[in-house]
Amino acid sequence: MRLEALVQASVAEALAKRRWTVPTEIPVDRAARPEHGDLVTRVAFPLSRELGVPPAEVASQLAGDLTAHPSFAKVEPVGGFVNFTLRPEAMHDVLRQVLADGEAYGRGDEGRGRTVQVEFVSSNPTGPLTIGHLRQAALGDVVAELYSQLGWRCTREYYLNDEGRQMDLLARSLWARYRQACGDDQPVPEDGYHGEYLAAIGAELADAWGDAHRTWDEPTRALFRDEAVQRMMAMIHEDLEAIGVRFDVWTKEGDLHRRGLVRRALAELQARGAVYEKDGALWLASTKHGLSRDPVLLRSDGTPTYTMVDIAYHLEKRERGFDLVVDVQGADHVDEQQQVLLALKILGFPDGFLRYCLHQFVTVKGEEGVQRMSTRAGRFLRLKDLAAEVGRDVARYFMVMRKPQSHLVFDLALARDTSMENPVYYVQYAHTRIASLFREAQREGTAPPDLRTVDLSPLTDPCELALIKEVDRFPDVVRVAAHEFAPHLLCEHLETVSGLLHPYYARVRILGQGPVTAARLALLGAVRLVLAQGLTILGVSAPEEM
RNA sequence: GCGCCCGUAGCUCAGGGGACAGAGCGUUGGCCUCCGGAGCCAAAGGCCGCAGGUUCAAAUCCUGCCGGGCGUACCA
């Protein structure tokens, strides 16, 4: 049994025996400091109110009931807390369970039979992906993987907005670059896209097509738009490939129109009286529900806005039968999110159907100091180039090692660093060390045939027990990281495990210790399992050698 | 102005009601014949932005300020 569950079960049993109320959730925490033992419950605090007895008294009685429990070496009441020190045997049971579970360790089945869609990146095809998109790509991919671990069937989706004003601006910008390559001094529109990448394509087109398209007319616009979108998509695919992100479904805005979803979504909102007309446009009455502004849904020229299509898109997601939809979006979308959530509420969607994973922006700390990226201004670090420079593993890890809603400073110097000061290498190297040890053991012929059956009783060193306790947390970390969209918790956990392993490895001899060796290899086998599983969830490799 | 997010060690950040506030980097001082030193050990370093409030208990919850980011489009 896992450690927290062990304490919870024993406490519940003791409470039931005394005919005290057994709370549905018995709070059990890791002890904050060694003298508090291994685990602690503060269940005495809520109980004391109910029983009309001081917390210390409740804790004392509870501790008395549990001292004889075979899994606990010591059960000590301190104030209202009850501190548990576990017997090594209880920890060894955990280790045995981990090894028995193997690669299934950390997986859950809460999502069995349920489906989740994670929509992320969804960048307009107006340029290659940058380090700014990377946060979203890594975050979405890891959140999807976390849900998969919990048994959900998961669809990774990219929403492709290949219509509208921005696409026209892109086409116009490309055409200007093309004209420049033909020798005209046609300027890129001020609000257009100024990146060098369009100039390169413009030059290619000038070579291929010659001076054929001199004026900006409708056929030219259509031609350059198609060409631009196609080229941009190719770049985006290259960037995604470079960091190992794959999508299951690509949904185009145009499809939503063609299938009549936009019209239907609007009609439903109108039927519920949520829409009004003003200045020839149709507006969503949001301020009535406490939001700070009403957005336009249908422009006075009859075309739907981004918000309108977004609402229709979620109607479509619902009809596809997803139990949960997660949209990963940047902080610039908060207003949009509130509008969509409101619209879905009006349309009668169940609460919690759509959850936003919102993240703050990335700044890069490099040679030129801290800089904000801008695709439009052509000031960005392309994903493909970044991945080529620091590696896919580092690129991905750095993007998820911070809480999504915190601003992230990408430290280029640290990312380039290949020593253990770089947390990615620190964790990977922990895995490598164990792999290397197992290779060595194999060579010496001391590797036990089956780690699950070895005698674990030699594992009594505090470092060894600390490692087991940390490994024991892994399934909880995965669960919480998924539900709270918090992959950084997993990074932290892996760094903690590695931080326990390295000193242990440096101090304690593993091989050539007779029966102790087998026990220690079993422990390291479990550690390796957690490191490998954790890194894999993050989309980072767990190398056998470095 | 209004809405959302963030202010924790010199830097980058964890912790988001419970016991003396944590990590990595940086700084300072030690340790390398040893399964991979791409390392290990130790020390210094904090009115947890400020001020009130709620609570047996606040970095954590509430209110008000101050500072930063993003938004506040018939762009997406």
Image (spheres, coloured by chain):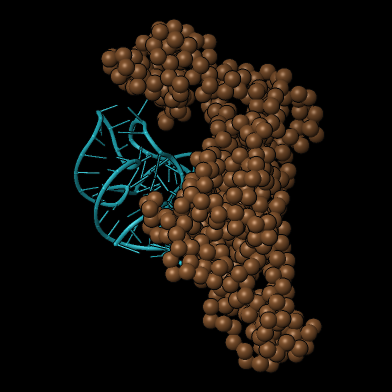
Chain colours: A brown, B cyan
Q: What quarter of the picture does the N terminus of chain A occupy?
A: top right
Left or right of B4 on screen, residue A328: right
- Residue sitting farthest toward the front: A271
Q: Nearer the viewer, residue A516 or A331?
A: A331
Left or right of A334 on screen, residue A192: right
- Residue at the image point whose x is 71% and y is 20% from the top: A454
Specify the quadrant of the image occupied by residue A264.
bottom right
Q: Position of residue A63 (x, y in %)?
A: 40, 13
Q: Position of residue B40 (x, y in %)?
A: 54, 41
- Residue at the image point whose x is 61% and y is 31% from the top: A110
- Residue at the image point whose x is 64% and y is 35% from the top: A114
Number of numbered callouts drawn? 0
- Residue at the image point whose x is 35% and y is 18% from the top: A47
Left or right of B62 on screen, residue A295: right
Q: Position of residue A263 (x, y in %)?
A: 60, 58
Q: Nearer the viewer, residue B5 or A434?
A: B5
Residue A546 seen anywhere in this rendered image of the structure:
yes
